[in-house]
Amino acid sequence: MKLLLIKLGFTFAAMFGLNVAVYATPDLANGKKIDQQKCYACHAKKSGFGNGDMIYTRSDSKVKNLKNLQSMVAMCNTELRLDLFPEDEADVSAFLNKQFYKFK
């Protein structure tokens, strides 16, 4: 019984520790770096103008709020297999929000 409680305690600690990283203060410099390395070229190609930032500022933007922005970053990460950790997704979302969207 004691061993089971110890294992359960470690499991909760591990789960709590992983979740804390997602809620930590975003690293805007890391978000910018990831955007430049993994997002910009694809978005430049998609925009058709060779400017990856235009996708964020276009008038028909699909992103309408912060939660939607976070979902789009997560979707790109998954579908394009960018191999970003949850905290990286949070950093990219925070950087894009500060730089382009300005959602509260």
Image (cartoon, rainbow, N blue to C red):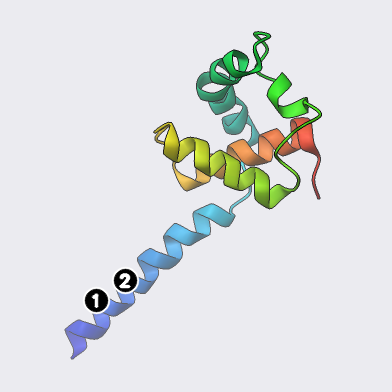
Residue 84: percent from left, percent from top: 44, 37
Q: Secondary structure at mark 1?
A: helix
Tell me how far mark 2 sits from mark 1, CA to CA: 6 Å
Proximity of marks 2 and 1: CB atoms separated by less than 8 Å: yes
- Toward the top, the furthest residue is 50
**Front residue of this view, candidates 65 and 84:** 65
* Residue under the point 51% across and 59% down: 20
Residue 85: percent from left, percent from top: 44, 43
Residue type at mark 1?
Lys
Residue wearing tag 2? 11
* Observer able to see residue 99: yes
Compared across the picture, whether 48 is left or right of 60 comes to left
Q: Secondary structure at mark 2?
A: helix
- Residue count near mark 1 (Cα–Cα under 10 Å), binned few <14, some 14–19, many ≥20: few
* Residue under the point 30% across and 71% down: 10
Residue 23: percent from left, percent from top: 58, 56
The disc at residue 7 is: 1
Residue type at mark 2?
Thr
- Toward the bottom, the furthest residue is 1
Report which quarter residue 52 is drawn in. top right
In this view, 80 is above or below 66: above
Compared across the picture, whether 85 is left or right of 60 comes to left
- Residue count near mark 2 (Cα–Cα under 10 Å), binned few <14, some 14–19, many ≥20: few
* Observer able to see residue 84: no
* Residue under the point 52% across and 43% down: 74
